[in-house]
Amino acid sequence: MKKYKIAIIKGDGIGPEIVDEAIKVLDAVSYACGFTLEYEDYLMGGIAIDVTGVPLPDETVSGVLNSDACLFGAIGGEKWDTLARELRPETGLLKFREAMGVYANLRPAIIYDELVNASTLKPEVIEGVDIMVVRELIGGIYFGQPRANDGQKAYNTMVYTKDEIIRISKQAFELAMKRDRRVCSVDKANVLEVSQLWRDTVEEVAKDYPEVELSHMYVDNAAMQLVRNPKQFDVILTGNIFGDILSDTASMVVGSIGLLPSASTGDKTAIYEPIHGSAPDIAGQGIANPIATIESAGMMLKYSLGESEAATMIDSAIKKALKEGYRTKDIAAYDAKHVVTTAEMGDVIANFINK
Ligand code: IPM
Ligand code: MG
């Protein structure tokens, strides 16, 4: 039987609750498809600070490097917000992404037919939306040096090298080839030098993909277009901070931030995580939506383990659960037949796989 080593990082807030449900579903699907998943837990974020004094223990880095893939929940919370920046949960996450070399963050935003009414946007605007945000993840203003804050003056540096832009652009064009063959590159080239280099470089890479239609959009316009007419987008290619913002917008297009999965891939172990945060305000109440994390587990099966059939089974089970009216609280306002807890949603999806 095939065996895979999966690193599990539950993190803080709702992290443990949603990851537990994804594991439940992974167990069901691995059993059904005849492969074994061996899980190993690692610490990161606030819990790592509490237990080890640092947000990203060395053990986590080496353990994940030795795994076939990493499933991650979420980190952060008020409790750790006043720590020095170096010690904050978010710094741990950024260092982790850097250590894994995961430069390409894929954030699909696909509307489930069953949930067209769950979005705050009109059904006719969002029906059929299928967007892939390709966000550069280990560069840009998140990582640029110098950076400082002396209490009177603070600054960060937005920097991209040509090589960094080339490698993320290639990912976007390769993905577009398997989709609708359209790439919209988002930047702020009317103001920023770094965006001008971004735009020029994307143009160069595009020459190797003559079948893909390339367009450019300024980020402010892109934010507007995403809610005005999201169906115009296929692949959105963008840098770290613009991708962070636009993917949250995309999540509301599809109805809830609890629905959007992501894959962070690069040269080493890939990380699979929901795009949402640790939501400390609802932690422990059993109301978090586990679907984004379960979908992330599906992406892990497909992209890192090559178990596409298992990934499809997860997808179908989620659709079936939604079709039969199972809803967590965040999406309960419309078409709900059964309003369920986090764990019940996991059970329902796992059971549909077993059938
Ligand atoms: C995300 C999150 C992170 C980011 C935070 C928690 C550092 O918002 O994954 O989108 O900004 O990348
Ligand atoms: Mg974000």
Image (tube, grey):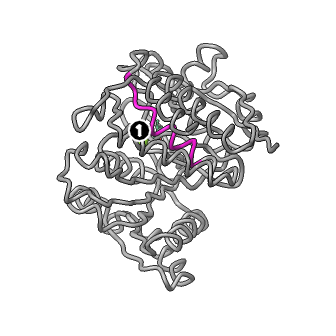
Q: Residue at x 49, y 35 (%)?
A: 349
| Image quarter (top left, top right, bottom left or bottom right) of the C terminus | top right
Q: Which residue is mark 1?
A: 321
- Asked if residue 155 can be seen in this view, the reply is no
Farthest right residue? Answer: 1
| Image quarter (top left, top right, bottom left or bottom right) of the N terminus | top right
The correct choice, above or below, for 215 with respect to 101 in the image is below
Farthest left residue? Answer: 122
Q: Residue at x 64, y 24 (%)?
A: 43
The correct choice, above or below, for 47 with respect to 294 in the image is above
Farthest front residue? Answer: 355
- Assess disc 1: are there few (<14), some (14-19) or many (≥20) residues with their C-alpha within 10 Å of its C-alpha: many
Residue type indicated by callout 1: Ala
The span picked out in magenta is 287-299
The correct choice, above or below, for 252 with respect to 75 in the image is below
- Assess whether residue 173 is covered by the magenta stretch: no
Image coordinates for residue 3, horizontal then vertical, percent: 79, 41
Image coordinates for residue 17, horizontal then vertical, percent: 50, 23
- Tell me: 46 left or right of 325: right
- Assess whether residue 289 is covered by the magenta stretch: yes
Label 1 SS = helix
Q: Residue at x 41, y 68 (%)?
A: 185
Image coordinates for residue 160, horizontal then vertical, percent: 52, 60
**Observer-nearest of 307 and 324:** 324
- Asked if residue 3 can be seen in this view, the reply is yes
Predominant SS along the magenta part: helix
**Observer-nearest of 229 and 335:** 335
Q: Quadrant of ligand 2?
A: top left
Image coordinates for residue 92, horizontal then vertical, percent: 58, 32
The correct choice, above or below, for 79 with respect to 345 in the image is above
